[in-house]
Image (cartoon, rainbow, N blue to C red):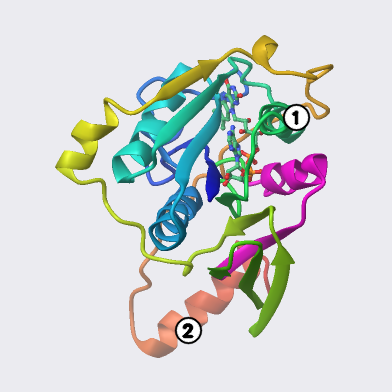
Amino acid sequence: MNIFVILKQTFDTEEKISIQEGKIAEAGVKFILNPYDEYAVEEALRQKEQHGGAVTVVSVGPARVAEALRTALAMGADQAVLIQNDDSGSDEFTISSLLAAYFRDQAFDLILGGYFSVDNGAGQTAVRLARLLEIPHASAITQLQMTSDQATVTRDAEGDTEKIEIRLPALFTAQQGLNEPRYPSLPGIMKAKKKPFLTLEPQQLNGIADISPKTIRTALSLPAERKSGRILQGTIQEQTVELVHLLRSEDKVI
Ligand SMILES: Cc1cc2nc3c(=O)[nH]c(=O)nc-3n(C[C@H](O)[C@H](O)[C@H](O)COP(=O)(O)OP(=O)(O)OC[C@H]3O[C@@H](n4cnc5c(N)ncnc54)[C@H](O)[C@@H]3O)c2cc1C
């Protein structure tokens, strides 16, 4: 079975983020494999363990993205493909078009991705890819069972559980709960260094026409700084009176 995972390197949203000239400043930022894509990699490895075949991980982005691909190789993926793209203004149209051009030349049974990326969070790239490849897809899956030509997936739908049968080849995006991703082991990290790693320039992909972004981000800002808290003093009654006064005069919520 030919299993592919599309993955994105994101910055760690737990770390301090700063903005310079309308963009996230990349200097000093810690980059990680998008957490939802870790579920996708883990699921690909589990499906391979069950059905055999190979797992290929693919990402679009600048050279630093190689690190995220190496993490997936260290987890157990067989080979990696980096589609080099240094345009930080790329949008989901650009990324999915580049991926589609790559996949049109591949034989695949299953493509897995993340439900959304934790930085930009459009949740569009994988679904657009399925549309461009004209294959069925299901988003945010929490279970995947496969036979040679069919998959049964489970999704959480507003508290209910939905089961869908889909003919392969198909694309699925991974939701939290699909599995518990393994950590790369030390031997895995050593082996990853020797695994096939292909770097492609967009011009090497067939059928690439205009991939310039269809959307332009006009502003990006951090959330307003939170005001420091205030501890009210006095008896409960005095505190209550003061609280009501503040809610009325300062926050104007009552
Ligand atoms: C600070 C910053 C700098 C960036 N610089 C570049 C750059 O130089 N070059 C560049 O090409 N892109 C760059 N990008 C990434 C690009 O903007 C996004 O990949 C693209 O807009 C996808 O949208 P999204 O992040 O909302 O992903 P979503 O649509 O939310 O992602 C959903 C899923 O699609 C898949 N996916 C998303 N993005 C990719 C990808 N790039 N490759 C493979 N699979 C993917 C993953 O499985 C992911 O979980 C940058 C992003 C940021 C935040």
Which segment did they paint magenta?
Answer: 121-143
Viewer-closest of 37 and 201: 201
Q: How far apart are marks 2 and 1 (CA)?
A: 59 Å
Element assignment for label 1: helix
Residue mark closest to the camera, 2 vs 1: 1
Q: State which quadrant residue 87 falls in.
A: top right
Estimate the x, y position of residue 165 in percent, counting from the top left. 71, 72
At a point 81% along the width and 39% down the height, the residue shown is 132
Q: How crowded is mark 1: few (under 14 residues within 10 Å), some or many (20 or more)?
A: many
Point out which mark residue 202 bears: none
Left or right of 241 in this view: 105: right
At a point 64% along the width and 38% down the height, the residue shown is 107
Ligand 1 is within 8 Å of the C-beta of the residue at disc 1: no
Q: Which of marks 2 and 1 is nearer the N terminus?
A: 1
Instruction: Residue under label 2, please give it.
Output: 240
Estimate the x, y position of residue 53 in percent, counting from the top left. 46, 48
Q: Is residue 177 rendered magenta in the image?
A: no
Q: In this view, does 135 lie above or below 212?
A: below
Q: State which quadrant residue 206 falls in.
A: top right
Q: Which amino acid does label 2 sit on?
A: Thr
Q: Residues within 10 Å of mark 2 (few under 14, many from 20)?
A: some
Q: In which quarter of the image is the C terminus?
A: bottom right
Element assignment for label 2: helix
Q: Is residue 137 rendered magenta in the image?
A: yes
At a point 40% along the width and 20% down the height, the residue shown is 27
Q: Can residue 19 be seen from the camera position used here?
A: no
Estimate the x, y position of residue 100 in percent, counting from the top left. 72, 33
The quarter of the rendering in which ligand 1 is drawn is: top right
Left or right of 222 in this view: 93: right
Instruction: Residue under label 1, please give it.
Output: 97
Estimate the x, y position of residue 93 in percent, counting from the top left. 77, 32
Q: Can residue 72 be seen from the camera position used here?
A: yes
